Image (cartoon, helix red, strand yellow):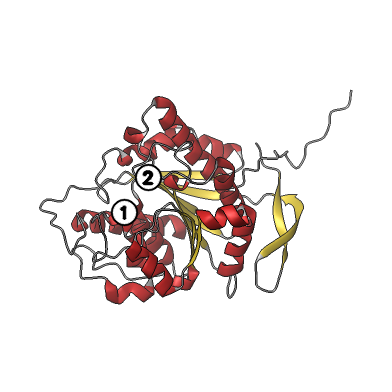
Amino acid sequence: MRTGVTRVLLVMKGSGALHGAFKIFRRNHHSVGIIGAPFSKGQSRDGVQLGPDLIRAAGLVEKLKGQGCTVKDYGNLTFEEVAKDETTGRAKRPRAVGQANKQLSEAVRKIKNEGHACVMLGGDHSLAIGSIHGHAACGTQLSVVWVDAHADINTPLTTPTGNIHGQPMSYLIHELRSKIPVMPNFSWLKPCIAAEDVVYIGLRDVDPEEHYILKYLGIKTFSMTEVDYLGIAKVMEQTCDHIFSKVKKPIHLSYDIDALDPSLAPATGTPVVGGLTYREGIYITEHICQTGLLSAVDMVEVNPKRGGTDNGVRSTVDAAVDLLLGCFGRVREGSHSADYKIPDP
């Protein structure tokens, strides 16, 4: 698919949501900066650090360029090992996670300041701490759309597992600041998003403590029950109603591959049955692209050591690539170059 046309939702109502009929116009040019974060210490299962290079090897850069994007690949960050990384509260390996996320925050901030939409390839979902922080550090308020089977909003004191990949949102939300203990290697981090600017899509494995936090903060959530009841188009319409109700802020899309059903994406550390279909997962990215406000994307938790078979790994990696292509202008109807003409005989 080459530079050409795409479909964009046109009619803007008073709430700022995107509604109505589609209109054809030339697709916006996307400048994309990619950073790999091969990091696995936010959880306990080896292999997720291999995700970034697998996603690249599946042709991500070439395919983005093929649909008209300019791409700069910043390579992978290198993370130092941390000795004697004792648990703090219930949180495991806080020093390694804090140090890695500080590096990532600085890298994302650099990519954004150089004018690109940032794609962070993980690694586990603890990396959203640094990715979102670095994005917000550019001086703008963000809306966060979190697509995941899990809420990842346990605090270091509520977590049942201790794995920080189940906690990143609690570090980032202003309203939870008083609930976070002092953590080694986290002194650089200040909360940077408001609870009202967060929307979850795809939830189906939420801890009781997380359920309480979500209700306590009044965070907008669409579990798989709502996805089933409303349909994904209505879910995305209501998502935009919510995040654009006051001011249209840049969107940070944090996409855990386990949001998809394990039949599509089995190569991940914590699969949960009953997830998004391929079509639902892609529609989310297409709709957010159409807003024109997508500013950064996380693609995390691809773990080739958990796929069971080569086909399972390939299916998961291919899904991750397709989701990212949807974020930056791929349209399933096809497209054509603006100057194409049918040849005369």
Q: Quadrant of residue 165?
A: bottom left
Q: Residue at x 62, y 47 (%)?
A: 329
| Amino acid at dot 2 | Glu
Look at mark 2 in the image and give the residue it sits on.
301
Asked if labels 2 and 1 touch by Cβ distance under 8 angstroms, the answer is: yes
Q: Quadrant of residue 331?
A: top right
Q: Is residue 11 left or right of residue 60?
A: right
Where residue 23 sits: x, y (%)? 76, 54
| Amino acid at dot 1 | His
Q: Residue at x 39, y 65 (%)?
A: 211
Where residue 195 sits: x, y (%)? 44, 71
Q: Residue furthest right?
A: 345
Q: Is residue 74 left or right of residue 6?
A: left
Q: Residue at x 36, y 64 (%)?
A: 210
Q: Residue at x 62, y 50 (%)?
A: 29
Mark 1 / mark 2, whichever is N-terminal: 1
Look at mark 1 in the image and give the residue it sits on.
165
Q: Nearer the viewer, residue 203 or 57?
A: 203
Q: For the residue carrying disc 1, how many other residues have a C-alpha within 10 Å: few (<14), some (14-19), or many (20+)?
A: many
- Mark 2 lies on a secondary structure that is loop
Where residue 214 sits: x, y (%)? 41, 68
